[in-house]
Amino acid sequence: DNTLAISTDESIKLFDIRRLEQPRLEYKGHGCSNSKAISFSPGEESKIATGGGVADKTIKVWSTNTGTLFAQAKSVAQISGLYYLGGK
């Protein structure tokens, strides 16, 4: 896949590395909190997990094709790292 994920604010932007001029998708689900973690699913390339900072404290799983939110979970602290384990 030729997808690059970047977060410098409350949003996560997905870029096609062959066309970096403009993001192909943008997720804005972590409110006023910076997104602190991003992880692509190794078993399902169409999913990405993101983690919110101290004001948000949620993990969200999104579609990399449509931007649809699949699932979310609240944490007791900011999310500073996300890692998929295993395949699917």
Image (spheres, rainbow, N blue to C red):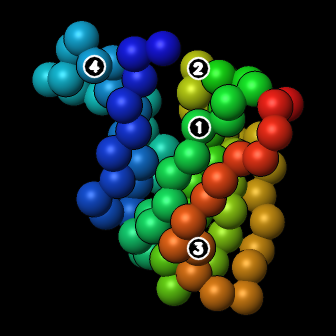
Report how far apart the C-alphas of labels 2 and 1 lie in the structure: 12 Å
Q: Is residue 74 left or right of residue 13?
A: right
Q: Please tell me whether residue 6 is drawn above or below residue 17 in the rendered image.
A: below
At a point 77% along the width and 58% down the height, the residue shown is 72
Q: Which residue is mark 1?
A: 40
- In this view of the protein, can residue 56 be seen by the observer? no
Residue 2 in the image: state x and y as whole percent.
40, 16
At a point 40% along the width and 70% down the height, the residue shown is 34
Q: Label 2: state its secondary structure.
A: loop
Three-letter residue code for mark 2: Asn
Report how far apart the C-alphas of labels 3 and 2 lie in the structure: 24 Å
Three-letter residue code for mark 4: Ile
Three-letter residue code for mark 1: Phe
Pointer 2 with pointer 4, Cβ within 8 A: no
Upstream in the sequence, badge 2 or badge 1?
1
Report how far apart the C-alphas of labels 4 and 3 lie in the structure: 26 Å
Upstream in the sequence, badge 1 or badge 3?
1
Pointer 4 with pointer 3, Cβ within 8 A: no
Q: Which residue is mark 2?
A: 65
- Of residues 2 and 52, which is closer to you in this image? 2
Q: Label 1: state its secondary structure.
A: strand
The quadrant where residue 88 appears: top right
Upstream in the sequence, badge 3 or badge 2?
2
